[in-house]
Amino acid sequence: MTTQIPDSYHVLEFPYTRTTGPVVGPFLTALRDGKILGSRIDGKVYCPPLEYHPTTAAAVESELVEVGPSGTILSWTWVAHPTPKHPLSESFAFALIQLDGADTPLAHAVKAASSEAISTGARVTAQWREECVGAITDVYFVPEVDAEQQKIEPGEGDVIITEHLISLTISEPLHPHRRRFAEGLLEGKIIGQRSPASGKLYVPGRGYDPMERIRLDQSAEEEVADVGTVVGFTEINPVQYHGQKERKPYIRCSILLDGSDQPIQGIDIRHIGVDDFRVGMRLKAVWKAPEDRYIEDLDNRYGTIPDTVVERWDPTGEPDVEPDMLKEHTI
């Protein structure tokens, strides 16, 4: 059976929150309410509005004036394959649009049927989304002939805080030994690597012996038991932050699988209370059905046996192992 293992894929993301100030705040408030504002400075209108003089950078008292909602494309580029961070999910154009009444162009998205529907000098008109929140993405542009009449209901209060998600996407293929480890998990097997130099069995394998510093290839791999002993644990009380999915306390433990010399780490236990959990306890993996197994959060640096392949770890009912016998494996 050929198993398809996806590349390792991660998104690092955090929210960035800031106050909007005396110029950007009214600009975003106006966008939410169906208007586009520019700032008049020394007789010229700048859109988006500025808090400073564009030539001297000195602070200025900006006069905010309404511009658009239509304008002329000065230049553009077609985005054939948008990413999740782009303002539109379908192919679109980024364009410099000189709005009517403004002296400078606004960079924004133009939604069109194809790149043939976009051209320098073409007229476009702003369109508002069904739900406006006071952000530059409340609005996008379409060819003037495709524009629809919209009635935008003003929101409540002024936009004084704005929040943005800053993110970085990381994608990389798994190393061969990590890919074989992942393939084994999907087949209900735990694959380790035994060093010919030390005789120690490491789970999961790293592609090298961390003590003897020699490379380990596929010939060093062997299947490991899915039964082991708890060598350490902690109770996790999740701190609530952006993106946190955990809500209830749970146990995170390390398990020394029978026959191995290195405990697997980061095993989460949610069906056993902390008062009933202990070092030396014997546990056995309860695997998910083959059709329900998939690999997630396994990359080249982290990840042992995820709960996307193992349903849970149940007590075997065997007597506990004496903690003193586990000292050399405690992490």
Image: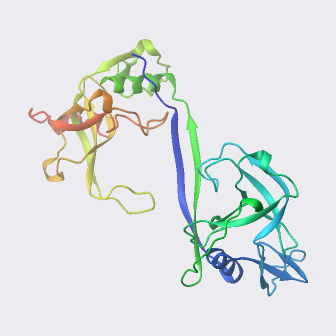
267 or 162: which is nearer to us? Answer: 162
Quarter holding residue 246: bottom left
**Residue 142 vertical position relative to residue 279 in the rendered view, above or below:** below
Assign the C terminus to one quadrant of the image: top left
Q: Residue at x 75, y 72 (%)?
A: 69
**Residue 249 vertical position relative to residue 29 in the rendered view, above or below:** above
Q: Residue at x 23, y 48 (%)?
A: 270
Quarter holding residue 166: bottom right
- Left or right: where 38 falls relative to 84: right
Q: Residue at x 75, y 65 (%)?
A: 125
Q: Residue at x 64, y 56 (%)?
A: 87
**Residue 309 vertical position relative to residue 77 in the rendered view, above or below:** above
Horizontal and vertical percent for residue 90? Answer: 63, 48
Work out whether residue 208 can be spotted.
Answer: no
269 or 115: which is nearer to us? Answer: 115
174 or 47: which is nearer to us? Answer: 47
